Amino acid sequence: MGPLIRLEATLTGDRYLSILSDHLHSFISIVHSNGLGQFQQDNATPHASRVAIKWLQEHSSDFRHFHWPPQSPEMNIIEHIWDALQRAVQKRSPPPLTATDL
């Protein structure tokens, strides 16, 4: 687990790079100071961007990066988490009206 980063705009490779450098790196450094942390992401376009791949390669000594096999959504537990979150939000009364309420 890591910090939840709220985006106000569409995720691009450059925005993703700033999340990696501003949030992931410090989180991994604290939680896995021994260098044994493992980072997992899917093959979304921003995740597979040249700038993100280059940054991950440059920081490969700080943590391990799990390379996601193409076309393997069944491995991604986040889909189950999104489903559970959606059901929990739908049960809320009153429903959240803003991103901050959510």
Image (cartoon, helix red, strand yellow):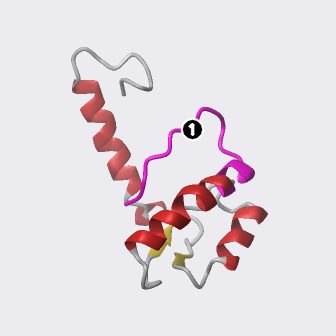
Residue that protrudes farthest toward the right in the picture:
50
Q: Main secondary structure of the magenta part?
A: loop
Identify which residue, 41 or 60, lies in the foreground: 60
Residue for point 27% across, 34% down: 87
Is-magenta flag for residue 54? no
In-image side of 11 versus 1 (left or right): right
Does residue 41 appear in the picture of this structure? Answer: no
In-image side of 91 versus 35 (left or right): left
Residue for point 70% across, 78% down: 58
Residue for point 59% across, 56% down: 22
Identified by mark 1, the residue type is: Leu
**Residue 98: which quarter of the image?**
top left
For label 1, the SS is loop
Magenta stretch, residue numbers: 1-17
**Count of numbered badges drawn on the protein:** 1
Does residue 82 appear in the picture of this structure? Answer: yes
Identify which residue, 66 or 73, lies in the foreground: 66
Q: Position of residue 53 (x, y in %)?
A: 70, 69
How crowded pointer 1 is (Cα within 10 Å; few <14, some 14-19, many 20+) is rated as few
Q: Is residue 40 above or below residue 32?
A: above
Residue for point 37% across, 44% down: 82
Identify which residue, 3 or 13, lies in the foreground: 3
Q: Position of residue 70 (x, y in %)?
A: 60, 68
* Quarter of the figure with the C terminus: top left
Identify which residue, 75 or 34, lies in the foreground: 34
Q: Position of residue 37 (x, y in %)?
A: 44, 77
Q: Is residue 16 above or below residue 91?
A: below
The residue singled out by tag 1 in the image is: 7
* Quarter of the figure with the N terminus: bottom left
